[in-house]
Image (spheres, rainbow, N blue to C red):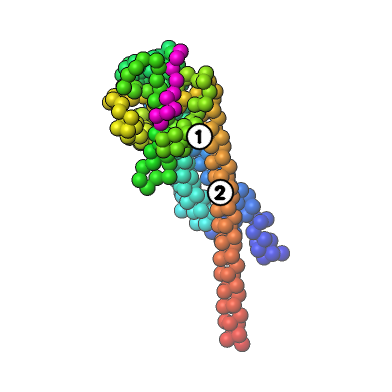
Amino acid sequence: PATAAHADYKSTSPFSGWTRREHLVTREVALLVFVPWICYVLLLLVFALPPPGVFASVFALICWAGTLLAAGISYDFQKRHGSPFYKLLTLTVLLSCTAGPLVGHHIFVTEMSCYWMHQSGVTYKGVAPSSSPDAYQDAGIIDFSDGSNLDLRRVLGSRPVGSTTTYCIAPIMDSSASNRVHFFAADVDCCEPRRSFVCGDAAKPSARTGVVLPAHSSSYNAKRWQHFYNAAAQAAEVYGWNLPERPIFVRWFDDAEAVQSALLHQGLVEAFIQCFVGLCASSIVAMWLHWSLAYYARGAESKKQTSRRAHNNSCC
């Protein structure tokens, strides 16, 4: 009975006999799933959602150090008890410490940085398109003056070499006759090379609002801004414009508040999706590790039994 009880590894305490056990119990599999996933979710959220600033950066660094500390504690248990469970837990937590910040930073760069820039940026109203753009470099939202509209006859779509993305721009004009264009409506994959600009609310005559595309909030946004600038420079050569050093590119909409809400919604949905993907990945990895260890343990036990039989036969 004692031997049978020892063979049933699921009936053993998860805190005793670590060096003699060759399988992961159900409780350990759950820990192997949820501990790395919780670390991953925590790091993803603190790197993706908070506004940029010193406090958010310090808090994210503290959380990251905390997950590394958890991995260190697990590694210390592994050295003391020799359990393969703690070794696997250490490795999966370290993987979460890498994946969480990377995915969270990607969400911040592509989704949340624009939202926070618009929240912290200045809103200007009644801006004439012929005004100098230098006075509005800190803008988050620009409401253009009555009579402002897009010149849809002089649009341009530029696709960089090796890219599948088309960067579309259209000049924002008013009734003043000028060959200088300071503001552009811009977006991606919403126009033909020189026509059919359907970005944002370009088809709505009532649209007068521009949500400014950031130029410096992240390397991703800086690179995208540069592509829009290259498209505007090409358009200036084609249509004979004079282009300022720092034109302002905006997404053209009728309701800027709805756009801000949409940016926040996109960021939250992306974070939720990545958390769910992380849970699925953590479950798959934990089950695979459990199966692999159990298969290895069965193979080792089978070799031991074969060796015993061969030894007994040789003795007889």
Magenta residues, dominant SS class: loop
Q: Which numbered circle lies on residue 45?
A: 1
Query: Label 1 sits on what residue type?
Result: Leu
> Which x, y percent locates residue 264?
52, 28
Residue sitting at x 50%, y 34%: 45
Q: Disc 2 designates what residue?
A: 282
Quadrant of the frame with the N terminus: bottom right
Q: Position of residue 130 (x, y in %)?
A: 35, 16
- Which is nearer the eye, 303 or 207? 207
Q: State which region is magenta.
A: 146-155
Say whether residue 186 is visible: yes
Q: Is 209 situated above or below 295?
A: above
Query: Mark 2 falls on what kind of element?
Result: helix
Note whether 198 is above or below 8 in the view shown.
above
The residue lying at 40 percent from left, 17 percent from top is: 174
Quadrant of the image occupied by residue 238: top left
Q: Is residue 264 left or right of residue 248?
A: right
149 falls in the magenta region: yes
User: How far, Cα to Cα, is label 2 from label 1?
Assistant: 17 Å
Secondary structure category for the residue under label 1: helix
* Residue 273 among magenta residues: no
Amino acid of disc 2 = Ser
Pinpoint residue 306: horizontal percent, then vertical percent: 59, 77
**Circle 1 residues within 10 Å: few <14, some 14–19, many ≥20:** many
Residue 157, position in %: x, y? 40, 36
Q: Nearer the viewer, residue 85 or 143?
A: 143
In this rendering, the count of numbered labels is 2
- Relative to 129, say whether 114 is above or below: below
Closer to the camera, 304 or 80?
Answer: 304
Instruction: Give the residue displayed 36% in from the left and 29% down from the top.
Output: 215
- From the viewer's perspective, is 247 left or right of 22? left
